[in-house]
Amino acid sequence: MPQVEKPKKKSKEKRPTRDEAILEEIGERLVEAKEEENEVILSVWGLDETVTGRIVELDARTKLVHVQKHGEITKVPFMDIMQVRNPE
């Protein structure tokens, strides 16, 4: 009887690891942008496009950052945020 090969598991690409200092800086920039109601540009792991808008909530329980632009809210996982920039 011929042996049937099991389908190979597709390995999901892993998020790059960042050290505590980088994560802390990202967190500080997010808090500052929320307090000052500044617009930010977030580079998000796994997304081809950046997320732009004002931070309206930093949810510590779900670890989601709520970004609002034109009335629409995008929820971004904190650990997926690779970079926080100010619009030029």
Image (tube, grey):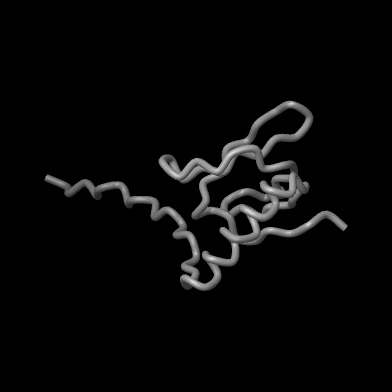
The structure residue drawn at horizontal position 30% and vertical position 47%, both measured from the top left corner, is: 7
User: Is residue 43 shown above or below 65?
Assistant: below
Which residue is more in the foreground, 11 or 50?
A: 50
Residue ranking furthest to the right: 88
* Quarter of the N terminus within the rendering: top left
Q: Position of residue 8 (x, y in %)?
A: 32, 52
Q: Residue 56 sits in which quadrant?
A: top right
Q: Position of residue 29 (x, y in %)?
A: 65, 59
The structure residue drawn at horizontal position 57% and vertical position 37%, both measured from the top left corner, is: 75
Q: Residue 32 sits in which quadrant?
A: bottom right
Count of labels shown?
A: 0
Q: Is 59 placed left or right of 57 in the picture?
A: left
Which residue is more in the foreground, 42 or 20?
A: 20
Q: Position of residue 27 (x, y in %)?
A: 56, 58
Which residue is more in the foreground, 49 or 42?
A: 42
* Quarter of the C terminus within the rendering: bottom right
Q: Is 47 placed left or right of 54 in the picture?
A: left
User: Is residue 77 shown above or below 86?
Assistant: above
Q: Position of residue 30 (x, y in %)?
A: 63, 54
The structure residue drawn at horizontal position 59% and vertical position 39%, both measured from the top left corner, is: 57
Residue ranking furthest to the top: 71
Q: Is 2 placed left or right of 15 in the picture?
A: left
Residue ranking furthest to the left: 1
The structure residue drawn at horizontal position 52% and vertical position 65%, both measured from the top left corner, is: 23
Residue ranking furthest to the front: 35
